[in-house]
Image (spheres, rainbow, N blue to C red):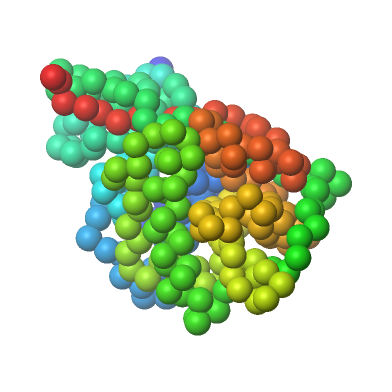
Amino acid sequence: MTYTLEWYDEPRAFLDRAGAWLDADPVVTTVVGSVAVRAVEDDEAGRPVGDHPRWWVVAADERGEVVGVAMRTAPFAPHPLYALPMPDVAARELGRALRARGEAITAVNGALPAVELVATELAAGTGTVRVHEGMRLHVVDDLAALVEPDRPGRARLATAADEEVAFAWFTAFHHDAAVQAGRDPAGETEVFEGGEVQARVESGRVWLWEDADGVPVSLVAHNPSAGGVVRIGPVFTPPEQRGRGWAGALTAHVTRRILEDGDLACLFTDVDNPVSNHVYAAIGYRAVVDMANLVIEPPN
C-alpha cells in the first residue's frame, strides 16, 4: 500500500477534506479537530495568525481515503508537530517528507506509535528521540458518571476584567504542571500569541471559581466543540489555593455544562502528575488512550 500526503494552509479546506475522518473518532482526534475549528473562527474574525508555522497534512491511501492526519500549528517554540494515528508506512513517509521540506522540527506530539515513527524518521542520522512527557486522554460521556464536589463559592464566566489574571494563569500552567510531575520546568512556559486568551474569554470558554469572598481561585478553559467533543484545558489553580478542591469543583461544573449541551467532555493529563490524575478520576473521568510528547535531540 502506498500513501499520498496532501498539505493544507487553510483550516477550512483541511476540515472539508478530513472532517469525516476526524468525526469518526472525535475523542482521540480532539486536539486536531478543535485547533482547526478555532483556526477557522480566528480567520473569519480577522485575528492575526502570528509568525509561526500553521499547516495541516492528510495521509490518503490509493483509493483517496483519509487514513491519518497531522498538523503544525502551535504558536509556541519549538512549534511541535502533532500527529494522529495512521498506518506505519504513512507515518514513516511523513517523517521523510518533512525532512525533504527542510522543516526544523525538534518535537513531535500525539498518538503512539505514529509519533514515534515520524520522529524516528525526522531524527535519522541527525539525532535521537526521547520521551519528554507521557500524556493520557480522559473522557466523561454520561452525566450519571459525573461527581460534583461541594465547595464554597461559585463558578462564573471570565470577563474582560479578568483577562490579565487569565493570561498569567494560562502562561503558568505548563511550568507548574511540570513541577507537579517531577520534571525540570525550564522551558515549559507556553507563550500565547495573537490575543488567544482574549479570544477565549470573549467566546465564553474561560471559567473562574470564586471563593466565598468573591476572589477568583481557579481557572478552567475549554476549546470549541469539534465532532461533538469539547476538550477542557488548561486547568490552573495558583499554588497558594491548591489542595482545597477548587479545580475539581470548577472542572465538574464546566463538564456538566458541556454534557448538557450535548457534547462529550475530554481532557489530557500528564501520566506522571498524580495530582491531576487523582482529581479528574474523582469527578468521573475515565482514561481512554495514552499519547506522548517526544523531543529530537542532537547527537552527543
Can the viewer see residue 56? no
Q: Residue furthest front?
A: 240
x and y percentages locating residue 32 in the rendered image: 47, 46
Q: Residue at x 39, y 48 (%)?
A: 175
Q: Residue at x 30, y 31 (%)?
A: 295
Quarter residue 244 falls in:
bottom right
Does 140 sit left or right of 204 as displayed? right
Q: How many marks?
A: 0
Position above or below: 173 against 123 = below
Q: Quadrant of the C terminus?
A: top left
Does 224 sit left or right of 175 as displayed? right
Does 236 sit left or right of 246 as displayed? left
Q: Quadrant of the N terminus?
A: top left
Q: Residue at x 44, y 48 (%)?
A: 176
x and y percentages locating residue 69 in the rendered image: 43, 38
Does 215 sit left or right of 195 as displayed? right
Quarter residue 268 falls in:
top right
x and y percentages locating residue 146 in the rendered image: 79, 48
x and y percentages locating residue 265 in the rendered image: 67, 49
Q: Nearer the viewer, residue 130 or 56?
A: 130
Q: Nearer the viewer, residue 17 or 209?
A: 209
Can the viewer see residue 181? yes
Q: Residue at x 41, y 19 (%)?
A: 88
Q: Residue furthest right?
A: 144
Q: Nearer the viewer, residue 65 or 132?
A: 132
Position above or below: 239 against 64 = below
Q: Nearer the viewer, residue 113 or 270?
A: 270
Position above or below: 133 against 185 = above
